[in-house]
Image (cartoon, grey):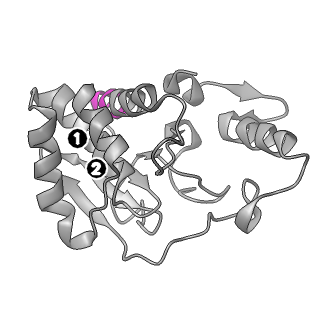
Amino acid sequence: MPLAWQRVVHGWPRRRAADLIRLSVLTAQGGQPGQGGWPGCARAPRQRVAPLMQAHPHDPGVILGNLHTDAAAARATAVISLCRVGCNDFDDVPVANRVGAWLVDQPGANAHPHFVVDQAARMLLELRKEGHVVLLHCAAGQSRTPAVAARYTTLTTGTPARVALAELRGLLDTHGWTLNPELRQVVEQL
């Protein structure tokens, strides 16, 4: 589904795209929540990593983060989540400006990784054109986030993917850069 549709999809009564996704996941799981109570939990389970709040090297209106990032402190008016989030995660950002692009950080686990990485980067571009400060995050901010940020760099500046990835590695290396090989290859192929 194109990510732009998440911003406009409504269900009944007062359901938004994230609510409908939660209902579909629970239905697929026989009504049983998964690890940590997801998808109905208030906050998604956190990894033991330090909070990340780093401006994109080519666009200070893009904040690279993780599940620990405080959207209000980052002054984010939009959020792109590349991992599972809870019902109340980032609830200080208007629901129409919260987009979820599921990207699993394990080689071979994504059915269409090129599509997801490209769609997330293009949604980031669209939100920036609307004037939003965008928090781009995954669980730890160490793999999915830099992959999509590198694709965004390529789309906005024409910088070759390997150069964009190297810049992000330099920026995020002290945070624990762990970009998985599949995502690196996807960014380079795009």
Q: Is residue 170 left or right of residue 175?
A: left
Along the viewing direction, whichever of 18 and 72 lies nearer the viewer: 18
Residue 34 visible from this viewpoint: yes
Question: Per the image, is 126 magenta?
Answer: yes
User: Would you call the spot at circle 2 few (<14 residues within 10 Å), some (14-19), or many (20 or more)?
Assistant: many
State which quarter of the image contains the C terminus.
top left
Q: Which residue is mark 2?
A: 146
Residue 133 visible from this viewpoint: no
Q: Is residue 35 positioned above or below 112 on the image?
A: below
At 18% across and 36% down in the image, what residue appears?
153
Along the viewing direction, whichever of 47 and 5 lies nearer the viewer: 47
State which quarter of the image contains the N terminus.
top right
Q: Position of residue 99 (x, y in %)?
A: 51, 39
Q: Is residue 168 left or right of residue 108?
A: left
Q: Position of residue 169 (x, y in %)?
A: 17, 57
Asked if labels 1 and 2 touch by Cβ distance under 8 angstroms, the answer is yes
Q: Dividing the picture into quarters, in which one does residue 18 lie?
A: top right
Q: Is residue 184 positioned above or below 113 on the image?
A: below
Q: Which residue is mark 1?
A: 150
Amino acid on which disc 2 is placed: Pro
Task: Look at the image and give the residue range highlighted in magenta.
Answer: 124-130
At 87% across and 54% down in the image, what residue appears?
32
